[in-house]
Image (tube, helix red, strand yellow):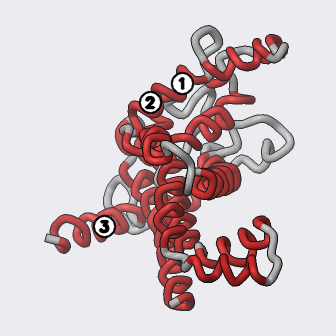
Amino acid sequence: MIAVGIVWPAVQTIGLAFVDAHGRFVGLQNFVSVLQNPETVDLGRFPFHSPPWGSLLHNAVWIVLHLPLSVILGLLLAVLLQRAHGAAFLKGVVFLGMVIPMIVGGVLVRFLFDEHAGVVNGVLRAVGLAAWARTWTDYPQTALFALILGSVWLWTGFAMLLYSAGLTAIPRDYYEAAAVDGASPWQQFLHVTVPGLRPMTTVIVAMTVLWELKLFDLVYTATLGGPGGSTLVLALQMYFYGFRALDPNRAAAVATLLSLLTLAVGVGFVRSSREGA
């Protein structure tokens, strides 16, 4: 089953990336064509001009912004709700974003930043920043950041859930010993909680980066990569090459690049897990 469903399609995809439309071997030509395309990397605009910066850089921006926000917020919620009244209900509400299909999540994110119905613009008007109210996903300057910020709540529940499980595994003796030594709550958090959650942090970071690299459905539903390619990501670019431009060779090149990136993250995660074991 693995050979038929995974290995053989992967080998065929890699093979397509090294041939042209007539089946002739062209080496790395498809990869060069993809990487030289401003749709993939546009260093002439990055970082001093507004997006589009290219799908590869957009994925990188997702990782730089979305990863720390979702991990830190998930950790804070897990710690704050550890002994709070109604913690189970509140965690369920936060985790709701995780169980929603990302296609639905994309629609919700779009409405979240809508000029008239969006909560974000409602808050801006309430604090006297009505001039900033707009449909954020309609402008290249703000669309990418709106998707990233809007998707944080969809993924924070995952980090919160794993950190909550990790907190229960830290022996209470460690906190009691630290308190006897005069450690403040903040010092206990830094020197007991954070090191005790390191295995969970490794899992959360690896899974989050993999999600950010493979991102497709949320962007497809919310903006379809627009406006003007300002939210295009690698998986969506692969889809456009394969099913709109009908260019399976460049689509296979993007798929191979994406697979190599995710493989690198997977190998790093396995090595980190072995070192921590």
Q: Which mark is residue 10?
A: 3
Check disc 1 and give the amino acid type: Arg
Instruction: Give the residue at the far left of this rendering.
Output: 1
Q: Where in the figure is residue 53, as x and y percent of width and height? A: 70, 43
Q: Nearer the viewer, mark 2 or mark 1?
A: 1
Horizontal and vertical percent position of residue 197: 59, 73
CB within 8 Å, label 2 to label 1: yes
Direction from residue 197 to residue 257 in the image, left or right: left
Image mark count: 3
Above or below: residue 222 compared with residue 277: above
Q: Earlier in the sequence, mark 1 or mark 3?
A: 3
| Above or below: residue 39 compared with residue 177 | above
Q: Label 3: state its secondary structure.
A: helix
Cβ–Cβ under 8 Å for marks 1 and 3: no
Give, as a three-letter code, the residue at label 3. Answer: Ala
Per the image, label 2 sits on a secondary structure element best described as helix
Q: In the rendered view, would you say 243 is above or below 63?
A: above
Q: CA distance from mark 2 to mark 3?
A: 26 Å
Upstream in sequence: badge 2 or badge 1: 1
Which residue is denoted by mark 2 in the rendering?
A: 221
Q: Please name the residue that numbered disc 1 is placed on.
A: 110
Q: Residue at x 72, y 47 (%)?
A: 42
The answer to whether residue 37 is visible is no
